[in-house]
Amino acid sequence: MSRTSSTLATVFRTVAIAEACSWTGLLIGMVFKYLVVFDDVGVRVFGPVHGALFVAYVVVTLLAARAFRWRPTTTIVGLVASIPPLATVWFERSVYRRGLLA
């Protein structure tokens, strides 16, 4: 594996985990907003963070798909994984275990 591929794999894994964490923060913010204190500070903080990490995840997934020559179905699953909470971590672990980040 070249240094560039290794760096891309690390960036992909980092962004996938960060995106899932931001999803969690946003969900917690929404619980507080609608059920606990009726204050939207959590949503105002985590909303933009999650939005930026969502876009970063999509871009990095497309770069990784091209660099590591993923099948179209793998790429689509990776992109769809950005929608349900925490699914990016599942997808990241899946491609890592199958050797698709090497």
Image (cartoon, rainbow, N blue to C red):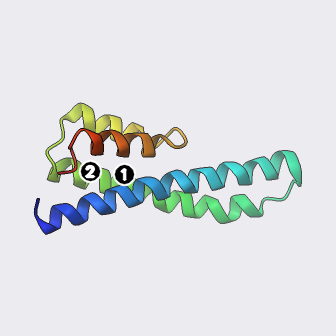
Tell me which residue sits at (71%, 51%) in the image.
28
Question: Viewer-proximal residue, 36 or 1?
Answer: 1
State which quadrant residue 91 falls in.
Answer: top left
Report x, y in % for residue 34: 82, 46
**View extreme (right): residue:** 37
Report x, y in % for residue 102: 17, 51
For label 1, the crowd category at 10 Å Cα-Cα, with few meaning under 14, some 14 to 19 and many 20 or more, is some
**View extreme (top): residue:** 73
> Is residue 3 depicted above or below 13 in this figure?
below
- Mark 1 lies on residue: 58
State which quadrant residue 50 falls in.
Answer: bottom right
Q: For numbered disc 2, what is the local secondary structure? A: helix
Q: For numbered disc 1, what is the local secondary structure? A: helix
Q: Amino acid at mark 2?
A: Leu
In the picture, measured across the screen, residue 87 lies left or right of residue 24, that is left
Report x, y in % for residue 60: 31, 57
> Is residue 40 depicted above or below 68 in this figure?
below
Question: Viewer-proximal residue, 54 or 87?
Answer: 87
